[in-house]
Amino acid sequence: MPLWLSPDPLVLASRSKVRHKLLVAAGIPIEVCPADIDERQVELAAPSQQPAAVATFLSREKALSAELSNPGRLVLGADQVLALDGKRFSKPGDRAHARAQLLALSGRTHALCSAVVLVRNATVLFEHVSTARMTMRTLSDRFLEHYLDVVGHAATESVGAYQLEGLGIQLFERVDGEYFTILGLPLMEVLGFLRQEGFLLS
């Protein structure tokens, strides 16, 4: 008997290679259908501007958008919001913005909120958000330039300009939070829901 019990793959409303890799490694077949939304405009429309609420709202809108072209399918939307002293950070557009973000985070503790929403038939079936607290060490100019040289374009692919599963771990002195939350997908909660609802063998 297969682990995944649904006749159709899970639709992932995200271009994230990390989320895709996590789900596939957990035995879940995936069909990628990135949401066609303007994330910054959707973010501004969130009813609450608290980081956890914004992450959940973005995840929900992504899932609902992708579900429009996949009616009746189970769709997963996810998003991550980084906040420091009430200010939210978005993915840096270029190296200069990545460097500015890292300097702002250097020597300080920021919150990383990861949300996930599952929808089907335009109905939210499950949503969850969790938060990790990330303490970045004080970064020297020499290290910062070396880091940006080595990671290259990857610095612009995630909020905060780092991937903890790679060289980004070198930026930190302390991490408080669940590993999958930091990677951008509260995976244990997703798996629990999928088992409970009969999508996964339990």
Image: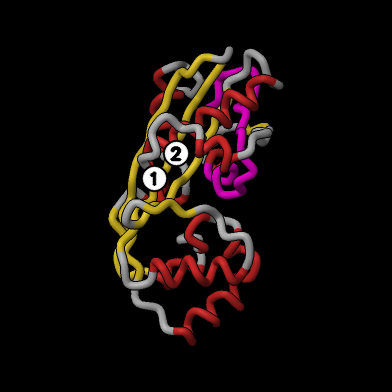
Which residue corresponds to mark 1?
113
Query: Splitting the image into 4 quarters, where does residue 148 fall?
Result: bottom right
Q: Residue at x 50, y 32 (%)?
A: 45
State the image coordinates of residue 150 (x, y, percent, origin top left).
60, 76
Q: CA distance from mark 1 to mark 2?
A: 7 Å
Residue 67 visible in the current orientation: yes
State the image coordinates of residue 23 (x, y, percent, origin top left).
54, 39
Q: Residue at x 61, y 33 (%)?
A: 12
Of marks 1 and 2, which one's residue comes earlier in the chain?
Answer: 2
Which residue corresponds to mark 2?
55
Instruction: Work out which quarter of the rendered image holds the C terminus and state it.
Output: top left
Q: Characterize the local packing of mark 2: few (<14), some (14-19) or many (20 or more) Cα atoms within 10 angstroms.
A: many
Residue lying farthest to the right in this orientation = 69
State the image coordinates of residue 42 (x, y, percent, origin top left).
55, 35
Q: Describe residue 103's horizontal placement relative to residue 61 as left or right.
A: left
Q: Is residue 84 magenta?
A: no
The reply to whether callout 1 and callout 2 are in contact (CB within 8 Å) is yes
Q: Residue at x 31, y 67 (%)?
A: 108
Location of residue 101 with respect to 4 vertically, above or below: below
At numbered mark 1, what does the secondary structure look like: helix, strand or loop?
strand
Q: Residue at x 47, y 16 (%)?
A: 198
Of residue 5 and residue 168, the one placed in the foreground of this image is: 168
At numbered mark 2, what does the secondary structure look like: helix, strand or loop?
helix
Extent of the magenta region: 1-22
Tell me the tag on residue 143: none
Q: Is residue 10 magenta?
A: yes
